[in-house]
Image (cartoon, rainbow, N blue to C red):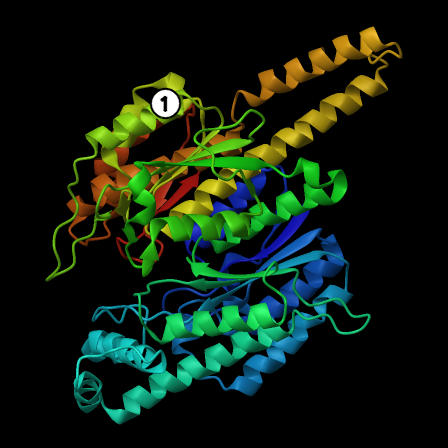
Amino acid sequence: MRILLVPLDDRPVTYTYPQLLLKSARVEPILPPRNLMGSLNRGAQIEELLSFCENAIAKFSPDAMVLCLDSLLYGGLITSRRSTEDLKTIGDRLERIKKWRSLHPMQVYGQSSIMRISDNYDNTEEKDYWKTYGRELFEWSACLHRLARREKMTPGLLEALERKIPEAIRKDYFDTRLRNFTVNQMLLRSMVSKGANKAFLDYLVFSQDDSGTWGLNVGEKERLEAEAKSLKLEDRVVAYAGADEVACTLIARALIDSVVKNKGEAARPSVSVRFSPDKAATVASRYEGQEIGATVAAHLQASGLHVNRNSTGSKPGDSFTLLVHGPTERQGDHITLPGLPDLSQIDTNQTVKSTLEELAASEHCIIADVVYANGGDPILVEELLKKPDLLSKVKSYAGWNTTGNTMGSALALALAGWFAELQDSTSISATAKETGEIKENALSRSAENYRVAGQVAQKTSRLSEPQKQCLFTRLLDDWAYQAKVRKTLAGEPSTKLLAEQISPFIKEISSAVSIEPAVRLSFPWRRTFEIEIGFEGG
């Protein structure tokens, strides 16, 4: 199987990690050269990117495409907030992309972001005026949403904010939002089949990062969901909290769709969901404006997994058990911003005990570690690394940034492994048939099936090298770096200091995962928010 992926930008979580994920699934990845992708201060080379995709479709005949449309339409996620290009220019690009399906029959999955609105004075990923008016724009946006919903507001607040924020800035911000929202409406309407022509996209995710409960972005999400419902597209369109992990989610969905198409609905993998503790589902998810449970449900829907409802534990025949390791009352945060409370130290000993008990009673587990934003729970990971018998049950782990980021990447890695195991099973069965080992009588067939099943079980009890690299990456990044090392760097992206601080963790994780990687570490955007973990020879 081949999948053509156009990432959101050139960051490790959007460019390199999805490639590793595809290799874990034994799928051939087709990606544009990294230098064509958008970066922090540079947009993608859009014309070259479009031409690359058209040539790749003709040359490689991919089975599916995963398109992060912000890259193709604006030049990247960050450029989508900064670009001043007009609607016609962007619309012309969209019309060009819509023709790709006629070049080769394939499944097409898309992501388009709902322009975020962050509550800070950080203009690193925004227009320059955010450093002066960021929080005021956030509040102004919330007021406009409340006004549209006829909700009560503090008297005079909207007027006070509009006096403080210059009219030209308010207009520029609103016009940029309107342009992007109009493009999202165009994308949504392009999914309606017209006559004999198949719709442009099979599945579309509207991703929403950095959100409060109220805001123009939330209002746009509501309007897009309502329009999708009116167009009877609820099964093919979803809007949810997340962004950087969406490509991984869509890869997972493409893998499931491929299997279901060939083997029928009965082949769809299933999952039982356990929250540890139960009340974690109702705790507010930081940076998302909703409860953790709502984010979990949306990501399960987008992945294509069948969810066993009303389950008090894993059921016989489940492909996976999803353990959502969460907070009891308030989600923590490994990053403490000025003027906000320090939530980087939470006592999770009791919750960890509960999570490990759930893990011991389950098989084929996915751990979504959402106790904290911006990193994993140190107590949980340290206990896991000391218990190889429990760690061996973990098909995937994630605990980075937001609940949405964690969910998408955790589910995707597990499903990549599931897909690879199916290929192994098919290969072993085919080999057995070719060598004449499966006999015609029932007894021989029974014995042979048992032998083949044993070979599959033996082979799948061990993770492949790419799967180990994925698990190693998540543990090293989400736990060792984000929760432990990052704070010691004091905002200085020093590779020398990084190597010194993280070296003991590399050894510990390598031993636990049974991998001996030669690791390359860097700060790709010259900031401490993210690191790149590369493997020599990879």
* Mark 1 surroundings: few (<14), some (14-19) or many (≥20) residues within 10 A: some
Task: State the residue at coordinates (16%, 54%).
Answer: 336
Is residue 488 shown left or right of residue 63?
left
Res. 24 in view: no
Q: Position of residue 13 (x, y in %)?
A: 42, 50
Q: Which residue is mark 1?
A: 512
Task: State the residue at coordinates (76%, 41%).
Answer: 262
Q: Is residue 43 above or below residue 465?
A: below
- Quadrant occupied by the N terminus: top right
Is residue 350 shown left or right of residue 370?
left
Amino acid at the residue labelled 1: Ala
Q: Quadrant of residue 52?
A: bottom right
Q: Quadrant of residue 241?
A: bottom left
Q: Nearer the viewer, residue 217 or 316?
A: 316
Q: Position of residue 173 (x, y in %)?
A: 34, 83
Task: State the residue at coordinates (62%, 29%).
Answer: 421
Is residue 186 shown left or right of residue 199?
left
Q: Position of residue 125 (x, y in %)?
A: 32, 68
